[in-house]
Image (cartoon, rainbow, N blue to C red):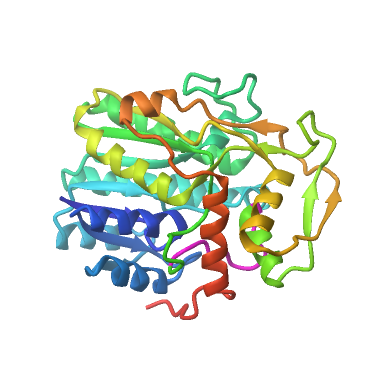
Amino acid sequence: MTVLVTGGAGYIGSHTTLLLLENGYDVVVYDNLSNASRESIRQVEKLAKRPVAFVKGDIRDKATLAATFEKYSIEAVIHFAGLKAVGESVESPLSYYENNVCGTVALCETMASYGCKSMVFSSSATVYGDPQELPITEKAPLQATNPYGRTKLMIEEILRDVWYSDKEWKVMLLRYFNPVGAHESGDIGEDPDGIPNNLMPYIAQTAIGKRAFLSIFGNDYDTRDGTGVRDYIHVMDLAHGHLKALEKLSEIEEVTAVNLGTGKGYSVLEVVAAFEKASGRRIPYKFAPRRQGDIAACYADVSFAKRFLEWEAERDIDAMCTDMWRWQSKHPDGYQHKEET
């Protein structure tokens, strides 16, 4: 099977591409490299000992999409491509709606015109907003609280409408929680541009000396130590969830949403302690006021994923931190070759 992976040069996309290659799939990576590196795909090819077809393109560019579908016999799409920073989405909402939502519409139109109607979509736990109950099941109310989350929610609704209009579509919505870690080789990992938006890469950059200290936003939440609690999932477990979803696509009869997480919540201070253990380095931190829109706790009910996908996360917080530290140690400045072609 030939799979198109949009955003395949990015963090989760590159790890999923590697796993697909290792499991015998042919992969076409489609990425505009706006927040990714071509070097990640070179490393994937080295690890998999197999070539990857790469197309530099934007999902809003229907001409390039059409040319890609014309050239390759695409049978399914794993759709990661999109802008993903919550804070940036608040500052620039129109760019998020235009890129994420309009881009997905263009992708679906192109897929339909070439008879490719199988998609695994990269959604997010942000569609649940501030949860009313924990752990969060797939039946929880959907109430995104920022533009990024609303783009994910809108895309979910668009994909449901597409399926409703044409039942040949097979669509799975993977709502994942907080991806962290790196491939165990340390050769591919998370390489954020500028100041990291997420906790783990910020901790890693503090440990390596690129950041003076970690700012912890809020220490007065109603949690066990006052800091925010999140469900962190190793990126390779997450990649494996996509592989299982792809295998299950042909069996589903309607658009199906699945949580991908560990079902366990770790506080910021617990993550800091685990990273100190993994790295052997102290992580200096300072408490700062809560950020607008942050919530106290968020973790998944993963029973449906276990039952339906026959999948569950295998790696614990220690493995997440150990693998992240290996990547950061080997690549203190991220990928060295960031040219775009």
Residue 69 in magenta?
Answer: no
Residue 268 falls left or right of residue 251: right
| Residue at left offset 53%, top offset 51% | 320
Residue 199 falls left or right of residue 303: right
| Residue at left offset 63%, top offset 47% | 86
Measured as percent of width and height from the top left, residue 257 is found at: 40, 29
Residue 1 falls left or right of residue 22: left
Q: In this view, does 337 lie above or below 308?
A: below
> In the depicted view, which residue is nearer to us: 18 or 207?
207
The part of the chain drawn in magenta is: 188-199
Measured as percent of width and height from the top left, residue 6 is found at: 35, 55
| Residue at left offset 41%, top offset 30% | 258
Measured as percent of width and height from the top left, residue 101 is found at: 45, 44
> In the depicted view, which residue is nearer to us: 279 or 118?
279
Q: In which quarter of the image is residue 260?
A: top left
Type of secondary structure dominating the magenta stretch: loop
Q: In this view, does 29 lie above or below 130?
A: below
Residue 59 is at least partly visible in this image: no
| Residue at left offset 29%, top offset 68% | 54
